[in-house]
Image: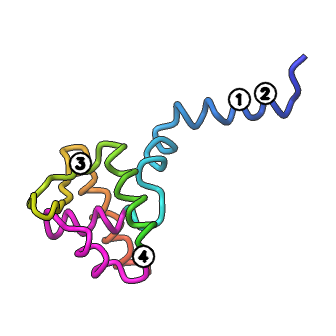
Amino acid sequence: MMSSWYLLRMARSYRQKHCPVARTLDAVGERWTMLILRDLLLHGPRRYQDFQESLAGVAPNTLSARLKAMEGHGLIERKLYSEHPPRLEYHLTEKGKSLGPVIRALRDWGRRNA
């Protein structure tokens, strides 16, 4: 017999997998992700050091983790801009660009309410 705890956990997992809001938050809900998107939308392709300068307080390991996660979700892609030494730029994909209206809505809300 299945425990009520197990059934509750399965129901929560099902809702998260099938809820568009939960799926979106899986992709962009981590701290710093929206600010990385903001920078890419405002300034175009960025280098790692550009993010470090504009995102005061972000730890290097956190920034690396967010960039990798965003790449994994198909929001950004890395492009080599120098081979010697190897250097990368981060670009928005079409999927990442489609978050532009969301970022603008957050900006507008912040201007009115924060």
Residue type, label 1: Met
In the drawing, does residue 97 fall left or right of residue 37? left
For numbered disc 1, what is the local secondary structure? Answer: helix
- Residue depicted at x 9% and y 61%: 82
Question: In percent of the image, x 16 and y 60: which residue is there?
Answer: 86
Residue type at numbered disc 3: Ser
- Asked if labels 2 and 1 touch by Cβ distance under 8 angstroms, the answer is yes
Task: Check the image and report above or below for 72 versus 62.
Answer: above
Under mark 4, the amino acid is Val
Q: Earlier in the sequence, mark 1 or mark 3?
A: 1
Q: How is the image coloured?
A: rainbow
Magenta residues (range): 34-58
User: In terms of image quadrants, where is residue 112?
Assistant: bottom left
Instruction: Give the SS element for disc 3.
Output: loop
Q: Which residue is mark 3?
A: 98
Q: Residue sitting at 42 percent across and 76 percent down? A: 58
Considering the numbered disc 4 on the image, is that residue within a helix, a strand or a loop? Answer: loop
Q: Nearer the viewer, residue 17 or 55?
A: 55
The answer to the question of whether label 3 and label 4 lie on touching residues, with beta carbons closer than 8 A, is: no
The 10 Å Cα crowd at callout 4, few under 14, some 14 to 19, many 20 or more, is some
